[in-house]
Image (cartoon, rainbow, N blue to C red):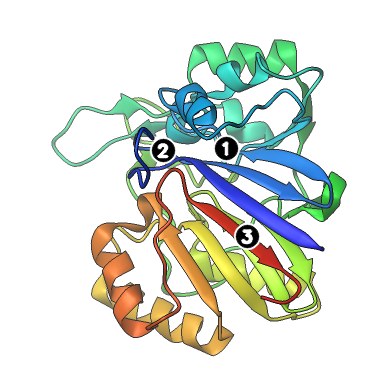
Amino acid sequence: MNNLRITVLAENTAGKLGILAEHGLAFLIETGGEKILFDTGQGFVLKHNLEKLGLSLADVKTVVLSHGHYDHTGGLHTALAMMEHPKVYAHPAVIESKFVCYRQMESRSVAMPEADRNALLQQADWVRTEAPVELPGGLRLTGPVPRTTDFENTGGPFFCNVAGTEPDTLPDDQAAFVESENGTTVILGCAHSGVINTLQYIRSLTENRPIHTVIGGMHLHSASANRMNKTIKALRKLKIRCIFPCHCTGFDAAAQLWREFPGKVRPCPAGTVITLNERN
């Protein structure tokens, strides 16, 4: 990797004049002379923010979907309409039915919207990611992440059916990463597999090389105190230099990370541009 540039196209917050926010996540990753769209948000702000940032997807040939939830896939049909013959890297379960069901509340669908599902099936070359894979430009995907820690509850209120009787283990959850001389940069969607599970798995795929930077959603917004304490302890052992928590990390968890890792935790609202190179 010579330079890695990540532009936040969609996120729960906005950080520049004219940029819009939504509950969702989308990154434009530029590495090794390639441009990759990582997730697409809900789709309400993608086109607007691209225009405001002076960016285009016309020369993007690759899309990665971290998992099948609507807030990461809802802009897929919009994105694909801007591209020519794109490849989409996503697990087979990305198009399956997905529901969220909290106690004493009606379940609701959180699956990929129908328009985006149709676009994936009809307008893209879908590469099913059931194992680690390397993309053009050196970006790598984990494929399904093994769940090995004893403190990361990767269940939650997610189900495969509307009745809420079939838990969705989210096998489609995956992360992306890029290696450099100074360490590995990790890009997360929601880390439904557990952020520590994900980071440890990536280290196993890179001969235990150090992790330099972590960017993205960590799904810690409802984490217990025990899980947060053990997550922080594990992150400290990894000696990560930069952490950009966003989206489903949650405000309280992000604030706790900021306190525990002074000078290393930074915000990344929509409109943020993160540039890393071999000298960082």
Q: Which mark is residue 275?
A: 3
Q: Quadrant for residue 21, please give it.
A: top left
Q: Residue at x 71, y 40 (%)?
A: 36
Q: Amino acid at mark 1?
A: Asp
Q: Residue at x 35, y 61 (%)?
A: 220
Are discs 2 and 1 less than 8 Å apart at CB? Answer: yes
Chain-order first, disc 3 or disc 2: 2
Q: Which mark is residue 39?
A: 1
Q: Nearer the viewer, residue 147 or 189?
A: 189
Chain-order first, disc 2 or disc 1: 2
Callout 3: SS: strand
Q: How far apart in space, not on screen, are marks 3 and 2 (Cα)?
A: 22 Å
Q: Is residue 22 left or right of residue 67?
A: left
Q: Is residue 95 left or right of residue 70?
A: right
Q: Residue at x 37, y 83 (%)?
A: 262
Image quarter in which the C terminus is found: bottom right
Q: Amino acid at mark 3?
A: Thr
Does residue 34 show up? yes
State whether residue 80 is above or below residue 263: above
Q: Which mark is residue 24?
A: 2
Are discs 1 and 3 less than 8 Å apart at CB? Answer: no
